[in-house]
Amino acid sequence: MIKPDKANPYLIIFALWLLVFAASSQVMIISPILPRISEQLSTPLEALGTLVTVYASMVGLFAIIMGPLSDRIGRRKILLIGTGGISLFLILHYFVTDFYGLLMVRALAGMAGGVLSGSAVAYVGDFFPYEKRGWANGWIMSGIAMGQILGIPMGTVLAEQMGFRFPFVLFGIIMSMTFILIYFKVPQPDVDLSAEKVTLKGSLAKYWKLLKRSEVRAVAVSYMFMFLSISVFVVYFPTWLEETFEVSGNEIASLFLVGGVANVITGPIAGRLSDKVGRKSIVIFSCIGLSLVMYFTTTLITEFWISYILFFITMMLVAMRISPFQALSTELVRSNNRGSLMSLLIAIGQIGYGLGGSLAGPFYVEKGFFSNTLMGAIMILVMAFIVWRFVPEPDGL
C-alpha cells in the first residue's frame, strides 16, 4: 500500500471524484427515468417515490453503523468495502423483473451507499489541511456536476433505448473502476484512529455524545432540511416537465447536462472563495437564492426552454452550498470522530431525503407540482436560519 507522504494528492482527488460521480449518478438517474420505470414495470407513478425512500432509509441506517467503524479501521478500508459492494448491487439491477425486485436492489445499493456516505468528505478532512479542504471538496463534489453533464444524459438515453436497467449497470462498472483505483493509489491517512472497540452500545453512546453539542445538533438538523428540500423538489421535476410540455427523455437529459455545467463551474469557485471569506455567508446566500428559485418555478417556466435557465441557476446555487457546508462540518470534531460525525449527518440527511421522496409523489398527484416547490422553498429557508443562528464559523476565517 502506498504511504501517505508518497501519495499524489491530485490522484486522490480524482479517485474520490470518480466515486462521487458514479455514486451520485446512480441516485440522480431515478428522477429523469421515473416515467420509463412506471411504463416498463407497470407501476403507478405516485408509488415510485418509495424507490427514493427505501434507498435513503438504508443509506441512513448503514451510515450510522459504519461511522464509528471508519474511525476505528480507517477511511481507506471503508472506501474499498463501499465501492466493492455498490458495484455488485448496481449490476444486479440488470436482473430485475418487477417493482418489488427493483425495491430490493435499491435497498441493497442503499446499504453500500450508507457505507460510503460521508467517507469521501471524512477522507478529505483527514488527508488535507483545513485551509485546503474547501478547494479539495470543491473539486471532488464537482463529480456530482459531471454526473449531470455526462452520467445522467448517458443514463437517460440508455433507459430510452435499452430499458431502465442499463444505466445502473453502467454506473456499477464505473464504480468497480473506482474500487481498483482506490486499492492501488489511495493511502490510509496518517491520523490517530479510535482506540475504542466498536460495539452497538459504544456507537450509540458516541453519537449521543456528539449530539449533546449544540453546534452538531444544528448542523444535523440543517442536513435534514437540506435533503428534504432537494428531494421534494427534484424527484418529480422532470415528470412535471414531461407532462406539462410533452418533452422527451432526451430533452430531459439535456436539461441535466445544462445543470451539470452550472455545478462544475460553481463548485470549485465556491470552495476556494469559502476558504477566504468563510463558509456561513456563502451557505446562507445560496439557501435564500434557492428558496426563491424553487418558489417561482411553476410561475416562471411557461415554456420548456425557460427550464434550462432556471435549472442552471438552481444547480449553481446547490453547488455553491455543498463544499463550504461540508468543509464547515468537518471542522466541528477531531479526526478520530470525523467519520462518525459525517455518517451521522448523512444519516439524518437521508431521513429528510427519504421523507421528501415519500411526500413528493402524493403531493404531486393530489396538489400539483407547485405544492412540491412551496414545500422545498420553506424547508431550505429553515436551513438558512439554523445555519445563521446556531452554526459557528471556525476560528481563522
Image: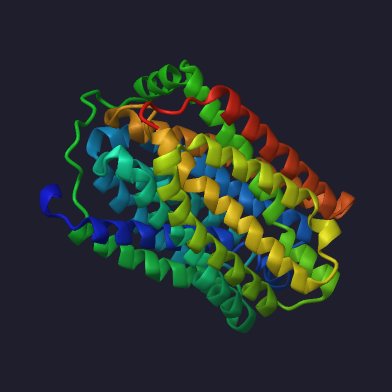
Residue 389 in picture, x, y percent from top left: 59, 23
Q: Residue at x 38, y 35 (%)?
A: 330
Instruction: Give the residue drawn at x 49%, y 62%.
Output: 265
Look at the picture and state if 212 lies above or below 199: above
Q: Quadrant of residue 314?
A: bottom right
| Above or below: residue 377 compared with residue 216 | below
Residue at point 45% right, 37% down?
A: 278
Q: Nearer the viewer, residue 99 or 134?
A: 134
* 61 vs 273, nearest the viewer: 273
Q: Is residue 52 above or below residue 342?
A: below
Q: Residue furthest bottom?
A: 161
Q: Nearer the viewer, residue 258 or 110?
A: 258
Would residue 380 be found to the left or right of residue 347 on screen?
A: right
* Quarter of the view holding residue 353: top right
Percent x, y for residue 252?
68, 72
Q: Position of residue 154 (x, y in %)?
A: 53, 76
Q: Is residue 43 visible?
A: yes
